[in-house]
Amino acid sequence: MNIIKASLRNAVRRRWKFALVVFVLGIGVVVLTYAYDIAETLERIQAVGQQIESEGAEPSAEQVEIMARGAGMFALFSLLNLAFGFGTTLFAFLMPGGMVADERRSGAIMLWAQHPMPLRSFYLQRYVGIQVATFAALAIFGLTAAVAALPPGVAPTTELGGVASICLTGALACAISFAITSLGIRRAALLGLLYYLLSGAVGSLLENPALATFPAVESARAVLRFVIFPAGVMRDLVAGFGSGVAWDWGATGLAVYHFVLWAGIACLGLHRLEKRPLKL
């Protein structure tokens, strides 16, 4: 059987339950969005809060009920939305499953080393199958998110940028996880996720307007954009799908750079692996 097809089927068999959980979370967001007008609920809460503040009196039972019901619904929506968004990224990091490092540690890699195909080509083909399965699942997640973000009766294709953002971010997360395991490092998904979260924290810190007056911050931004996870770059890139927005070729080049960077790291790790398959 073709290695890519076999890898794709194996990836689906290993992760379909997790993918189903993420999809159900997305469906939950869609149901809440269509069953309740979340934006209107938030406006109602703010209006009641302003009314209570302007009157300076104790809130009535009706106002308390409106605030409690709206706050509970908004909290549930926010929690589901956060879980769905985090789940899509975590799913992508988990897809490679630490296959290279785990098989090297268990010795199973020696079975593949006896095959006439070089180990590097063998694992790269398996990675392609995993990436195809990942991208297909992310496209479904992205369309689900697009449906949740749109009012009824509008085609989800108008939110193409959001779908592309989920797909590109997840594809890069999968590439990072594969690159880490190709270096022989176990728990690649966990390390990749920590890198993703740390990158978000550093990126948010550097974008703080209070730090704009320091010359060193601008230099740090210029350097770290080539090192940290390019979440902001992805947003700038997919903004070009919107009408009337010029395509950001700088963001495109930087996104391609990160994909090439992690692909190169994976190839270097696999090249090293061919010389010494077993960890001694």
Image (spheres, rainbow, N blue to C red):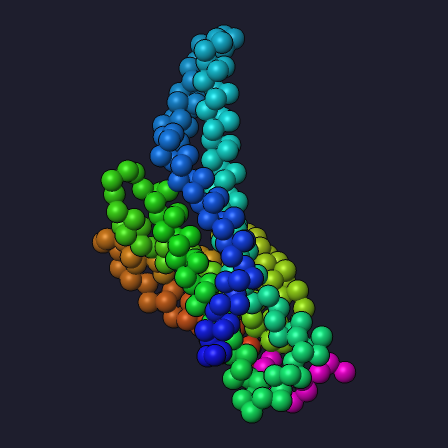
Q: Position of residue 39 (x, y in %)?
A: 37, 31
Asked if residue 62 can be seen in this view, the reply is yes
Q: Residue at x 39, y 57 (%)?
A: 139
For this rendering, which residue is in front, 53 or 105?
105
Q: How many marks?
A: 0
Of all residues, the one furthest to the right in this rendering is 280
Q: Is residue 278 magenta?
A: yes
For this rendering, which residue is in front, 249 or 97?
97
Of all residues, the one furthest to the left in this rendering is 244
Quadrant in which the C terminus appears: bottom right
Range of residues picked out in magenta: 268-280
Asked if residue 258 can be seen in this view, the reply is no
Q: Is residue 185 magenta?
A: no
Q: Position of residue 35 (x, y in %)?
A: 37, 31
For this rendering, which residue is in front, 218 or 146?
146
Question: Is 9 above or below relative to 75?
Answer: below
Q: Which secondary structure class fits the magenta region best?
A: helix
Q: Residue at x 66, y 64 (%)?
A: 187
Q: Residue at x 54, y 53 (%)?
A: 18
Of all residues, the one furthest to the bottom in this rendering is 116
Q: Position of residue 191 (x, y in %)?
A: 63, 62
Left or right, 112 with respect to 212, comes to right
Q: Residue at x 29, y 48 (%)?
A: 156
Question: Is 250 above or below relative to 31?
Answer: below
Q: Position of residue 27 (x, y in %)?
A: 43, 43
